[in-house]
Structures are given as structure tokens and as C-alpha cells.
Image (spheres, grey):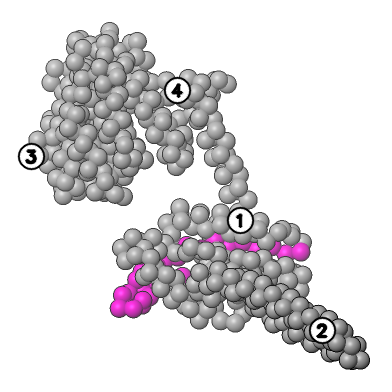
Amino acid sequence: MRMTNSRQFARFVVLGSLGLLSAIFAVTTMVAAQVAASDTGRPAHVAFIGFCVFVGAACVLGILALRYFRGLERLGLRDSLTSLPNRRALHLDFTKQIHLHGEVGIALLNFDGFRLVNDHYGHQVGDAALIEAGRLLKRVCGAETWVYRLGGDDFCLMMSGALAGTFLEGQSRRVMEHLAKPISVGDRRLMLGASIGLASCSTHNACASSELLRRADVAMSASKKGGRMRCTWFSESFDRKREDKRQLDEELRGALAGGEFRLAYQPLVSSDERKVVAVECLLRWDRPDGQQIGPHVFIPAAEESGFINAIGLWVLRQACTDALQWDDIILSVNISAAQLRNPEFPILIGQILEETGFDPRRLELEVTETCLVFDPTLAERSLDLIRKFGVRIALDDFGTGYASIGFLRQFRFEKLKIDRSLVVQAGSDEGSRAMMLSSIAVARAMQMGVTAEGIETEEQAAMVRAAGCDHLQGWLYFRALPAAEIAQHLGKTITASPVAAALTARVA
């Protein structure tokens, strides 16, 4: 706002000066003409005086305009909120320092808790927090480090000279120590925290200031992903990973358009009747070159890019279409945290159920604990809307994360799936067995069904049956099968598969 006002004022000064000069010139010309017409004999003297007045006025106004332009230029190098040097000043200073001292290091700082400050207290408090943070940075860094505000809650520190990077890292860690404590803004004490990315260059490995700033930004993002409140130096491997991720994103979009995804289904067997009662849908990616990409590779990439929404809808629509032919067994489909954060997701589920004609009472959506912990309010609202269609909700991979009894009560799952790791450990560790038994007891008390995952041996199957599990899932009975092979197993009593039997015999 201050910058805009200054520009308007400078424009007013320039236009006013030109107008005043024009008026002086016009008056001088008129006076000279009148004097010449009166033939007083002094037209040359009057004209000369008028010309001097005109030149003097032009010089004075020119000097004033130049001063205002210089002031405007100085304002153009300052951040209007914090009065710190801005991004443009950083680029100019970098050019000077790299020529003078041969080495420059920069640290890009982003506050971890600033978004929450804006959300909870509003932008006015957020602006005050930025002003106070700028003062803190200047106070901590002292005269030997330049401090800049680049925009938003991005600040930058710069040092030059021999070992600039080493000194800057120490300076950055001191900044983090101060930002780990609350800062006072009015009558509030706010926690900001900071993640910092470091990069440096010298005349031997020179780069442009924009490139050095990009490297620091990449390193800062790595600090965020690594747990926040940390300093990370830029590494060439970051760029390679970023390029690999970009390429994977492009391949994912091509895979969906080109029909490279396929679905497999792993049956779940009832504990008492030993018959298939449900199938879990599993996504597979077979590339044209014959390479199979595992879900643990492409699902996180799709979640980060947001493309998981399109993939997830395709999976749900295809799975519902396949399962129409499988009598009344339950279809279980995994959904990701990104899908659950999409407020339109419940509506899209309703549309798919209507398009395919699939009975919503046969559909079970599996969510993991990480889908729910980041925004429990939004997750609970979405799951409540989905339940209104008649769809069931299961908590997957229980025993590996954050779930508690209060967590289970809040979301009221219809089913609990005991993770494979807990089942395996329960076979040899008394503590793990007690944890598994207590988990099943809690689920029973809350009227949830219980499925044990990763069953590979008869001993594990006998243990979870005795513990009270309703359904068993694992290689002891079935691996993931193509949709065409599911129907032949329905209605039959299931025994251990030949592969699982051989594995059990080998272990014994």
C-alpha cells in the first residue's frame, strides 16, 4: 500500500512539474511578446530574464523530481510491511557480494506455524507476527548477516566471504533456537517455529542468484518433509528425486488414460465356516515395458500430486462393476487421505453407486489411521455422509499408528483390521499377543467386526480364531487374484493353498 502511494505521489510530482514548467514558459512568452509589441526598447532584456526564470524553475523542479525518484527507488528495495530489504534487493546484493568476496551463502526460512496464526487470529495478527519475527531475525543475526523478506512468511539470510556457508549454518541454528520459543505479539504468545534450507556458491561453482534461491527453497522443502524445525543443505540428489517424481507423475497420468492399471482381489475367509465372505480390491500397475510398479511407490506420488482422486474414482467404479457378479459378498476398497480431504468425495461415491447399480450395503471402505489424524473433523463429517448411503467403514492396519479407544469411539468403525505385523509378533511375543487380544476385546465391546491380516500359517490362523477374529486374510488361503478367478471360489469350504502349505512345511 505504501509503495503504491509513493508511486502515485511521484507521478503527481512529475506531471505537476511539467505543468508548472509549461505555465512558466507560456507566461514568459506572453510577457516577451507584449514588451516587443510596446516597443519599449527592452525586449531583449525581458526575454533573457524570462528565459533565466524558466531555466531556473526547470532545474529546481528537475532536482525535486530526481529526489522523489531516488526515494521511490529506495522504497522499491524495501518490504512495505517489515521494512526489511526485499527480493529485488537480495538479487542486487548477491551480485555485488559474489564479485567482492567470491563466496555467498543464503538460508531460506519459512515459518512452520504461521498458517495457523492466520487461521486462528486473522491476518492483522499475522502481519504483526511477521513484523516481530523480522525484528527478531535482525536482532539475532546482527550486522554480519543480511536479512530479507521475500514475501508471505518467507525470509532469507545471506552471508558472504570465506566459509560463508559454515557461518550461516551456525547463524541459522541460533535463529531456530529463538523461534522454538513463543514470540510476543500484543497480549498473545505465538509459536512459529521455522524450517530452513541452505545453499551456497562461489566463483568456482557460480550460479545466478535466482538459481541459488531455488536451491535453498528445495532444501527448505526437504526440511519440512523431514519433520520441520531443522536446517537442510541443498543436495543434487534433491533435483534428481524431483525430476524422477515429475516423470512418475506424467507416467501415472498416461497409465490411467492408457488403461495400464488393473485390479486384483484378495478374498477374506470367515473364521467359522471357512468360506469366502469378502474381497479386498488391490491396485496393480503393469507398464508397457513389462515392469510392475508397486503401490508403495506410485500411491504416495499420486497422493502428493493430487492425482490419487482420479485414480481412486476409477478403482471404485471398476471394482463395483466387477463385484456385481459375486453374489452378496462384501467388496472392500481402500481410500487415501487425499480422497477423504476432498469435500466432494461422498457425493462422487453416491454417483458411482448409482451409475453401477452396486448395493451400497455390500461396499466397505478401508481407511488408515493417518487418513484421520490430520483433520479429524473433516474426516468425521465425510465418513458420516458416506455412511448415509449404507456404506460400511473399516479401520485398516490397526496396531501400527495412533489409534486409541477414544479414537475408535469417535469414528464408530464397523470393522477393525488387525495389522499383519501385530499378528506375526503375537505368535512369539507375549506383550504383542496381549495387545492383540485387548484390541479384539475392545472391538467386540464396540460391536465391531474383526479381521486379521497377513495370515500365513495354520498356527497364526488357529491363534486369531481363538482370539475371536471373524475373518482371516492372507496367503494361507489366497493371494490376490484376477477378477475372473473369484467366482470359482465362492460358496466353497476353503483350506490352505498349496503354496501356503509348502511354506508352512518348510518353516516347520
Q: Which mark is residue 414?
A: none
According to the picture, the residue beneath numbered tag 2 turns out to be: 34
Precedes in sequence: disc 3 or disc 2: 2
Give, as a three-letter code, the residue at label 2. Answer: Gln
Quadrant for the C terminus, please.
top left
- Which residue is drawn at the image coordinates 52% and 35% (left, top)? 249
The total of numbered circles placed on residues is 4
Q: In which quadrant of the rendered view does residue 411 lie?
A: top left
**Residue 138 image point, x, y percent:** 52, 78
According to the picture, the residue beneath numbered tag 1 turns out to be: 214
Q: Which mark is residue 261?
A: 4
Q: Nearer the viewer, residue 244 or 461?
A: 244
| Tag nearer the camera, 3 or 4 | 4
- Which residue is drawn at the image coordinates 87% and 84% (left, top)? 36
- Which residue is drawn at the image coordinates 27% and 34% (left, top)? 346
According to the picture, the residue beneath numbered tag 3 turns out to be: 445
How far is the residue under mark 3 from the one under mark 2? 110 Å
Instruction: Classify mark 1: helix, strand or loop.
Output: helix
Q: Residues within 10 Å of mark 4 (few under 14, many from 20)?
A: some
Q: Nearer the viewer, residue 73 or 349?
A: 73
Precedes in sequence: disc 2 or disc 1: 2
**Residue 210 image point, x, y percent:** 65, 58
- Position above or below: 212 against 337: below
Q: Which residues are magenta?
A: 174-203
Precedes in sequence: disc 4 or disc 2: 2
- Position above or below: 318 against 297: above
Precedes in sequence: disc 1 or disc 4: 1
How far is the residue under mark 4 from the one under mark 2? 93 Å
Instruction: Classify mark 4: helix, strand or loop.
Output: strand
Give, as a three-letter code, the residue at label 1. Answer: Arg
| Tag nearer the camera, 4 or 2 | 2
Q: Residues within 10 Å of mark 3 (few under 14, many from 20)?
A: few
